[in-house]
Structures are given as C-alpha cells and as structure tokens.
Amino acid sequence: MSMAVLFLFLGAAAGPNWSLAADQTPVAGAVFPDITLSAPKSVEAQDYLGVRGKASFKISQIPAQLVILEIFSMYCPYCQREAPQVNELYQLLAKRQDLKDKIKIIGVGTGNSAYEVQVFQDKYAVPFPLFPDENFAIHDAVGRVRTPYFFGIRINPDGSNRIIYSKVGTIHDPQQFLELLLKQADLK
Amino acid sequence: MLKGTHQLLACVAVALLLAIVSPGHAASEQYKGKIYSAGELKPIDSATKLKVGDRAPDFTLSTIDREKVTLNQFREKKNVVISFVPAAWTPVCSDQWPGYNIAKDLFEQNDAILLGITVDNIPTLFAWTQEMGGLWFPVLSDFHPHGAVAKKYGVLRSDGTSERALFVIDKKGIIRYIDVHDINQRPKLEVLLKELEKLKK
C-alpha cells in the first residue's frame, strides 16, 4: 500500500509535465514574489517604468497601479505568435490618456540572454521593456511556468501588491483582456 | 523490507530534488503536455575526433520536404551551420529551432545556411516541426541507416540519440567551430553568431 503511494509520488516527480514546480506558481489573490530587475539601458524604457537613474528596481516600485508581466522566451513558438497581440495591448493603452500612466507592461525572457531578448524585441518591434532571465532565477520564483504566461499585478499605494491575473497562454482579444484586467484590478 | 523502504524513500527524495532543482528550461505552452521529459541526462556521451581545421565529412540526407540535401552543394556558396539536436518532442530541442526560426536574418547576414539534423524519422520530424509552425531551414532525417551522419561527426550517443551539437563549416568545406554542448542546456545564440561573424574576416 505505502509502496504504491510512493511509486505514485515518484511518478509525479519524474513525470513529463514538470508539474511539481508549476504548483508553486502564485495565483490570483496572492502576493507576487519580490523579484528585482536590472534597470533597462534605454532612457526611454527607464522613463516608461519611472526608474530613471536606478540601477535596479522591484516590480512594486514601478509608479503604476497595475503591471502586466509576460513571462516569455525568444525560443518559444507560442510567444512568437503571441507577440503581435501583446504589442496591440500596449498600443491600446498608449492611446488611453486615462490609463497609460496607470498600467505598464513588461516582459521577462526566461532562460534568455540579453542578446536573445534583443533578437525577440527587434523581430517583433516590441514597444515595451523586455528583461533577460538568463539563469532562470525569475522563472524559478514564479514556479517555472510554461510560456507565455501572464501576470496582472496590482500595486497598492503603500507599495504592497496583489496578483489579479495569473494564467498561461494567449491573452486572446487585447481589448477584452484589458477590460477583464480593469475589472479585476478595480481600475477605471 | 524496512531497509528497502528506506532506499526507496531516498530515491524518491533524490527524484524530487532533481525535479525541483535541476537546471531550468522553460517549456512552451505550444506543446501542452506533449513533450517527453527524460530528466537530466549525461551532459555528453560521445567523443568526436573531428577538430577545427578538418574538412567536414560530406553527407546526403532527406529532408521533411522530400528533398535530398548534400553538404557539398553549398561549397563556395554558403557557410553552413549544422545543428544536431538529440530527439524530436524532447525539452530544450523543442525550443532551440524555433529560436533559430526568428533569427533567419542573422544567418543570412553572415551568408550562412542552417541545416537541422536529428536521428528521428521523417514523419516524426514533420509532425514536430509543424507544431513549431514550420521552419525556414531544411530539417534532415538521419534515421536510416540509423544516426550514420551523427556517427560520422562523432556525436552519436550510446542510446542512439545525437548530442546537442553545432558545427560551423566555411565555404571551403572546412570546420571552423565545434560546440558539442551539454545536452541539458541550450547553446547561446550570440556565441554561434560571433563564430559566424569571424568567417567574414
């Protein structure tokens, strides 16, 4: 009996889905892990994130009310196909005077070097900042999600945060996705 | 019996630890649960006799488009990058080529063609690369006689898969770079590109 349980356990650990780590992914309602990113090199990107002059920053330090974080990889075909939709989401926000300072988008290229992230940025003319996660440190912190994976992180005035969206796969229609996030984040 | 249980527990602990801490790879949602994970493998399981400066062994293989590709057809025309990957439908391999797929310009800027090779049969390679959305470079099957080209290049592993290996061959047919990579990790794109840029000099 106990042996059978053990084998089941072993099967889950060594199985093909890497399911174990995925269970550690922070879900909606939880606090997003306290990860630190190096400030982007371009002044334009620094200004977009309000981190001018900083060497590094935490997501909750971005002066916005909602941060949309995409975990992607330059090597992921799904992420490649998703790139135009996420760009469109950025363009939708850029056109909304009432929202563009409240909501920011960033991408983290898991397992990607700075060079590889840049290849992705250039290929799809990604207008928002992308960051390398060469050693999978961020990927580990978010429970080794499959890519693309999207987090919506509500930043509170006191610097605390709460996840309002945590899902793998496409955002589908960018307009509808935005409306969903606004509702979940209680933003108008 | 008790001892056996303890050993088993130790195995479970090790397996769990491996599953948790083994060096990362990010699985694309593209493949859902279809990727077979063999876990952490022996990093390199062959020893190539080829070295930089050697003439690249010629070969002819069939592509998934039912064409034949011969290495020497690129002589005096293109630099050639050969990318051996261990097997279809496995982690790391399933994203290495999609990465190259968006780097076509970078290969072309260096007057290089890319040839992707595995020991899988053509229908398997076809299904796998379709799942990637198709690739711009030829995908060659080294299936029959099994792994003959991988063997010629000294990168056939003892289990019949190939290493994760890159060979850069210049227009004269001379090997200019060899990277028999840790099978568990993806080679950095910039390292390969730097090697290609060296060929311009």
Image (tube, rainbow, N blue to C red):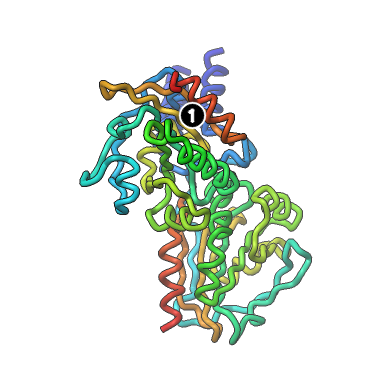
Of all chains, the one bearing label 1 is A
- Label 1 crowd bin: few (<14), some (14–19), many (20+), radius 10 Å: some
What's the residue type where badge 1 is placed? Ala
Residue B21 versus residue B77: which sits nearer the camera?
Answer: B77
Residue A87 to residue A63: above or below: below
Displayed quadrant of residue A58: top left
Q: Does residue A152 appear anywhere in the picture?
A: yes
Of the 4 image quadrants, the one containing the C terminus of chain A is top left
- Residue B128 in the image, given as x and y percentages of width and height: 68, 50
Q: Residue furthest top?
A: A1
| Left or right relative to A98: residue B98 | right
Q: Residue furthest right?
A: B66
- Residue B43 in the image, given as x and y percentages of width and height: 45, 53
Of the 4 image quadrants, the one containing the N terminus of chain A is top right
Q: Secondary structure at mark 1?
A: helix
Q: At x 60% / y 56%, what residue is drawn?
A: B161
Residue A48 versus residue B31: which sits nearer the camera?
Answer: A48
Q: Does residue B11 appear anywhere in the picture?
A: no
- Residue B142 in the image, given as x and y percentages of width and height: 68, 64
Q: At x 64% / y 39%, what residue is drawn?
A: B34
| Left or right relative to B130: residue B154 | left
Residue B199 to residue A154: above or below: below
Q: At x 56% / y 52%, what residue is drawn?
A: B93
Residue B113 versus residue B4: which sits nearer the camera?
Answer: B113
Residue A136 to residue B193: above or below: above
Disc 1 designates what residue? A22
